[in-house]
Image: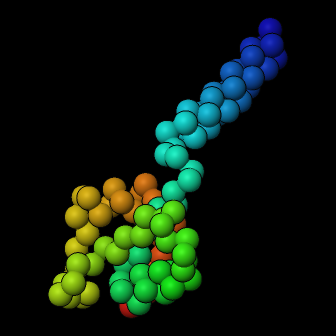
Amino acid sequence: MKRIFCNILVAVLTLACFTACVFDSSKKKDNSELSIVTTIFPEYDWVRQILGDNIKNTELTMLLDSGVDLHNFQPSADDIIKISSCDMFIYVGGESD
């Protein structure tokens, strides 16, 4: 009896894992537009140059506004949402960002 209960529990948990993946992928926006977020201008310009003519199919965002000091930057709630919902987040890391 205990073995049957364990097998049923494993089957339900496995099914729940696959169901979560299906629901998570349905929240994804249209795949025709790629969303890229960069932290500073050199990364933004680098990505823009690499994309070339394909930039029209991409939503490219730079987190820092012009004139904002990089060392005093604190991300807002909107910035964190942009980062968590983008397809690609490009940053230098370490002491540079």
Residue 56 place in picture, x, y as percent: 48, 67
Q: Residue at x 67, y 33 (%)?
A: 18
Q: Residue at x 34, y 75 (%)?
A: 62
Residue 95 place in picture, x, y as percent: 38, 90
Q: Residue at x 29, y 64 (%)?
A: 79
Residue 41 placement, left or right of 54? left
Q: Quadrant of the N terminus?
A: top right
Residue 24 place in picture, x, y as percent: 54, 39
Residue 6 in view here: no
Q: Nearer the viewer, residue 13 or 39?
A: 39
Q: Identify the residue at the far top of this view.
A: 1
Residue 75 placement, left or right of 27? left
Q: Quadrant of residue 19?
A: top right
Q: Residue at x 49, y 71 (%)?
A: 55
Q: Quadrant of residue 44?
A: bottom left
Asked if residue 41 is positioned above or below residue 15 in the image, the reply reads below
Asked if residue 3 is positioned above or below residue 45 in the image, the reply reads above
